[in-house]
Amino acid sequence: MGTGQPILEIVGLHAGIDGNEILKGIDLEIGAGEIHAIMGRNGSGKTTTANVIMGHPDFEVEKGDVLLDGKSLLELEAWERARAACCRKNELDWLLEPFVSL
């Protein structure tokens, strides 16, 4: 990682859905200019991590934090997170490209 404060930081994140803990202490730091990919087998928590970062209402954070530029995202509504330039990209977006006109 480069010098300075990370742009996105996940610290000890425990989260789940319907009382089932899925994330059990996730830690991640992403610095300016870095590119990261979250990879893993089915059920390992990749989508849950993205949903928690984006504020999906079905997911419950038990402890930990998600920081964007040093400020907690967990206290923001989903639209506020999007306004802060935090978004989720689905892996199959390319299927819609022929139908999207800008």
Image: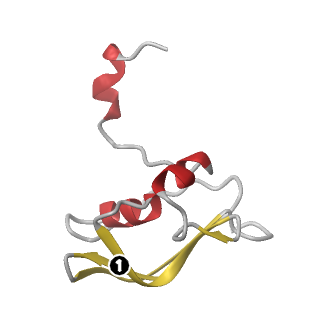
Q: Would you say residue 95 is visible in this rendering?
A: yes
In the drawing, does residue 84 fall left or right of residue 52?
A: right
Q: Quadrant of residue 68?
A: bottom right
Judging depth in this view, the residue of 71 and 36 nearest the camera is 71
Residue corresponding to mark 1: 15
Q: What's the residue at 41%, 44% (across, down)?
A: 89
Q: Mark 1, residues whose alpha carbon is within 10 Å: few (<14), some, or many (≥20)?
A: many
Which residue is pictured at 75% across the width and 66% down the height? 2
- Which is more toward the observer, 76 or 69? 76
Quadrant housing the N terminus: bottom right
Q: Vertical placement of 68 versus 95: above or below? A: below
Which residue is most to the right? 4
Q: Position of residue 41 (x, y in %)?
A: 23, 65
- Residue 101 percent location from the top left of the image: 43, 13
In depth, the one of 4 and 63 nearer the eye is: 63
At a point 33% along the width and 42% down the height, the residue shown is 91
Left or right: residue 27 versus residue 91 is right
Image height check: is 50 above or below 88?
below
Name the residue located 54 percent from the left edge and 70 percent from the top edge.
75
Residue 67, percent from left and from top: 61, 70
Q: Position of residue 10 (x, y in %)?
A: 54, 74
Q: The residue tagged with tag 1: helix, strand or loop?
A: strand
Three-letter amino acid code at the position of disc 1: Ala
Q: With respect to residue 60, does 51 lie above or below? A: above
Which color mode does the image show?
Answer: secondary structure
